[in-house]
Structures are given as structure tokens and as C-alpha cells.
Amino acid sequence: MIPFTTAVYYNPNTQENSAIYKPGFVEIVSKNIEYDSDSDPLKLVYASPSFMNEKQGPMQVVLVYEVNTNYIP
């Protein structure tokens, strides 16, 4: 989901990694900030402070995107 990219799926019980989702695995993601300019179809206009935090572990964030009504693909 925007703005995250799946890095790997991880099973904390078996310590196994997988490139595809399997039951019992959790998604490990990395930040991939897209849609930050006026030439994109969406523009990130607000990210809660927790999103910019570099701590590892679970996070809860609020992201607000603006639809660019002038966007031409």
C-alpha cells in the first residue's frame, strides 16, 4: 500500500522468510515515498509525525493524499 513496498514476508515462529505471503507470515515493509510532486496523480499532503520517525517496529500513521485534478497520464 502507498507509500510502502513489501520487502519480505516473515514468520516469527519459524524465523523463515518468504517472497510471497503464506499463512502465519507478517509483511515487512520499507518506506517508498511516492506522489510528492504536482506532476503525480496524487500528492502526499500530510503524514503524521510517527511516519517520519526512523524507529524500527510497528507503526500507526495517518496519511492524507490530495487528488491532482490536472493530472494527465
Image: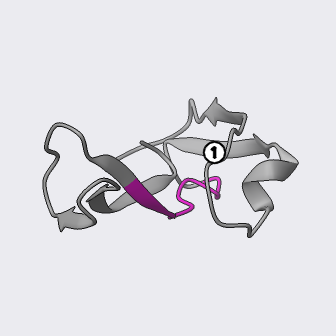
| Farthest front residue in view | 13
Q: Position of residue 51 (x, y in %)?
A: 73, 53
The reply to whether the magenta stretch includes residue 34 is: yes
Q: Position of residue 30 (x, y in %)?
A: 48, 65
Q: Is residue 58 above or below residue 69?
A: below
**Is residue 55 or residue 42 the one in the foreground?**
55
Provide the major secondary structure of the magenta segment.
Answer: loop
Q: Is residue 31 above or below residue 35?
A: below
**Is residue 14 or residue 53 the one in the foreground?**
14
Residue at point 26%, 46% (across, down): 25
Q: Determine which residue is flagged by label 1.
A: 43
The secondary structure type at the circle numbered 1 is strand
Q: Position of residue 26 (x, y in %)?
A: 34, 47
Residue at point 52%, 51% (across, down): 3
Q: Position of residue 64 (x, y in %)?
A: 70, 33
Q: Give the magenta part as a residue range.
A: 28-38
The kind of residue tagged 1 is Lys
